[in-house]
Amino acid sequence: MTTRERIVEEALTLFSIQGYQGTSVKNIADKVGIKDSSLYKHFSSKKEIFDTIVQEMSVRMEEMSRAFGLPDEKNLAEAAMLYGRITIDQLLGLSRQIFLFYLKDEFASRFRRMLAIEQYRNREIYEVYRGIFMNAAITYQTALFGEMIQRGIFNGHDPEAMAVNFYAPIFFLLNKYDQEPQKEAEALQALERQIREFARIYQGTGK
């Protein structure tokens, strides 16, 4: 890695353990093995390092979506038809991949822990956490489920309630098993039960 990349990596590790406020620029420089003055050649402030981490996570999420074959979020009709065509076993496989990405990917898991730690001490970081892991997910799924209801793929009348019913248990499972790597199989079994129950309740006549 370049020095700039190492700064981002070490900062993310420290932020995910000590929190953003609990980590100084000197702490980061020491971990990288450089002087404070050298770090400032790459980043003007700790805040710029944080912003770079958020940007990097956004890029990684997009790469994950492409790698797993997820539809473009801007094309709801295409996404609705894709999810309407796949079998429950295919949906379970896709759900496992996404779940394990957020649970086990070294960058994604540290990123989520960093935001969870700091959300109570820094309003701006709370807004990032809320935006990525709450608002964005629910907003997209609400729109998607609304499209699927219109096409007869899902039963239901309240797509936002459906989105919460789908997402909230999965978000809960991420937090429940976050520091229990030995219980991965248990976590995946719980995820499967959630997906199957959701499909049982909401599967429409169009599939």
Image (spheres, rainbow, N blue to C red):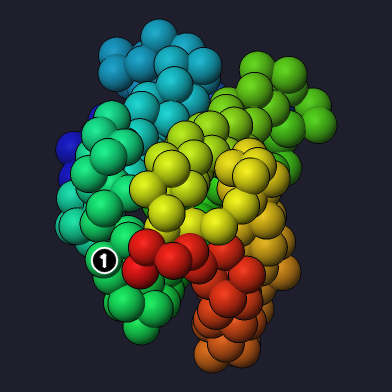
The percent coordinates of residue 22 (x first, y second) are 71, 33
Q: Is residue 171 visible?
A: no
How many numbered marks appear? 1
The percent coordinates of residue 26 (x first, y second) are 54, 28
Q: Quadrant of the N terminus?
A: top left
| Occupied quadrant, residue 153 | bottom left
Task: Check the image and name the residue furthest to the right.
Answer: 120
Q: Nearer the viewer, residue 89 or 52?
A: 89
Q: Nearer the viewer, residue 133 or 119?
A: 133
From the image, tell me which residue sits under label 1: 85
Indicate the amino acid at tag 1.
Answer: Arg
Q: Quadrant of the C terminus?
A: bottom left
| Occupied quadrant, residue 180 | bottom right
Looking at the rendered structure, the secondary structure element under dot 1 is: helix
> Which residue appears at 57% of the width and 64% of the height?
202
Measured along the vertical axis of the image, is residue 17 above or below residue 134? below
The percent coordinates of residue 158 (x first, y second) are 65, 42
The percent coordinates of residue 174 (x first, y second) are 61, 64
> Which residue appears at 58% of the width and 76% of the height?
200
Measured along the vertical axis of the image, is residue 180 above or below residue 105? below
- In the visual, does 133 lie left or right of 88? right
